[in-house]
């Protein structure tokens, strides 16, 4: 059988936020080469319909497959919520994982009393995928899904702390974390929200578990690669290649919010998905 373990893993997002997931994969699987595709020409996905998101995700996957990937990680929550089945049906031989199931399983395990609040984009909330996945892992849980569209632009503006950020976070979360039905777990169902995790934790207090799906997703990816004998155990760090569909300079600038390393402009290639 052909050894595919040296091939890269494709990581797909609507834009720059998926770098939170890329970072978790890099930390867990440093020997793996990665190709990151951010569909910056068509973001945000979080306000779009299920059909549009699925069509975009299929086009992005087709592009990544043409680079010769051994597995696909859908870092974008909105695409993970709407399009995984379509992607798996279109590419039956390609291992495809998303962030919803790993995140849901992590929240189901972390919640003390099963009162779980998922924050996500409008489109992800409309899909209902997170509550279904949480209830699958923890039947009887009380799940509330809250769209928080402002968080995406706040993070891209670097507004992750201070009085304005605090007020916006309180606007969305205070009603969900007070009273007899208060949540005990906050699941971050959007690529951008880990940047706000310290603020969420400070405002909600230590008794609320703040769960980010990125690290659990990296673990699930590792298991899947091992199972399919696709792991690259190289001691040399794998390459990371960045593809965008528009505005590479903005990608480079905003990336600083999400990854601790510098992405240089010449490392980012602009491609056309059409
Ligand atoms: N990447 C998206 C997500 O995780 C957030 C940004 C967007 O709406 O495109 O749902």
Image (cartoon, rainbow, N blue to C red):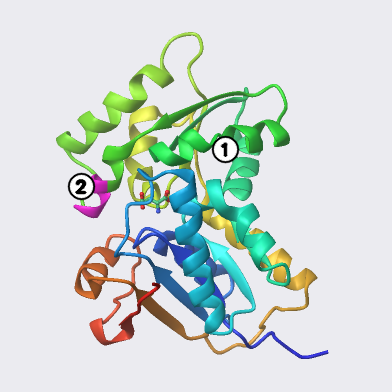
Residue name at image x 62 percent, y 49 percent = 102
**Residue placed under numbered mark 1 in the picture:** 130
Point out the stretch of residues depicted in magenta.
Answer: 153-157
Image position, residue 262 (x, y; %): 29, 76
Say which of marks 2 and 1 sits in front: 1
Q: In which quarter of the view is residue 201 placed? A: top left
| Left or right relative to 15: residue 33 | right
- Is residue 160 visible in the rendered structure shown here? no
Instruction: For ligand 1, tell me if the residue under mark 1 lies within 8 Å.
Output: no
Image position, residue 80 (x, y; %): 54, 52
Residue name at image x 55 percent, y 34 percent = 128
Find numbered disc 2 in the image and state the secondary structure of the residue it sits on: loop
Image position, residue 228 (x, y; %): 78, 73
Name the foreground residue: 21 vs 127: 127
Residue 270 lies in magenta, yes or no?
no
In the rendered image, the quadrant that contains the C terminus is bottom left
Using a 10 Å C-alpha cutoff, classify the residue at mark 1 as few (fewer than 14 neighbours), some (14 to 19) or many (20 or more). Answer: many
| Left or right relative to 79: residue 271 | left
| Left or right relative to 40: residue 36 | right
In the rendered image, the quadrant that contains the N terminus is bottom right
Name the foreground residue: 69 vs 262: 69
Label placed on residue 159: 2
Q: In which quarter of the view is residue 30 placed? A: bottom right
- Is residue 157 visible in the rendered structure shown here? yes
What is the chief secondary structure element of the magenta stretch?
Answer: helix
Residue name at image x 56 percent, y 53 percent = 83
CA distance for labels 2 and 1: 26 Å
Q: Are marks 2 and 1 in contact (CB under 8 Å)?
A: no
Residue name at image x 39 percent, y 59 percent = 14
């Amino acid at each position: 059988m052909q050894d595919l373990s040296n091939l890269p893993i494709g990581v797909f997002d609507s834009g720059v936020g998926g770098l939170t997931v890329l970072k978790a994969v890099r930390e867990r699987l440093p020997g793996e080469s990665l190709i990151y595709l951010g569909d910056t020409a068509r973001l945000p996905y979080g306000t779009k319909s299920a059909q549009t998101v699925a069509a975009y995700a299929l086009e992005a996957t087709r592009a990544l497959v043409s680079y010769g990937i051994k597995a696909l990680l859908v870092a974008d929550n909105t695409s993970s919520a709407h399009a995984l089945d379509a992607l798996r049906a279109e590419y039956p031989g390609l291992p495809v994982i998303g962030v919803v199931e790993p995140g849901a399983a992590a929240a189901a395990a972390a919640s003390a009393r099963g009162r779980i609040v998922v924050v996500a984009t409008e489109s992800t909330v409309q899909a209902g995928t997170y509550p279904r996945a949480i209830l699958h892992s923890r039947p009887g849980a009380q799940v509330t899904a809250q769209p928080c569209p402002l968080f995406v632009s706040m993070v891209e503006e670097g507004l992750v702390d201070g009085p304005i950020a605090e007020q916006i976070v309180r606007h969305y979360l205070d009603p969900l974390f007070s009273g007899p039905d208060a949540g005990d777990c906050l699941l971050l169902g959007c690529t951008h929200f880990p940047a706000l995790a310290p603020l969420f934790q400070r405002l909600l207090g230590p008794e609320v578990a703040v769960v980010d799906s990125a690290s659990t997703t990296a673990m699930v990816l590792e298991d899947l690669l091992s199972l399919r004998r696709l792991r690259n155990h190289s001691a040399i760090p794998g390459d990371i290649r960045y593809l965008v569909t528009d505005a590479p300079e903005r990608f480079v600038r905003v990336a600083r919010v999400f990854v601790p390393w510098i992405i240089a402009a010449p490392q980012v290639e602009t491609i056309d998905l059409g």
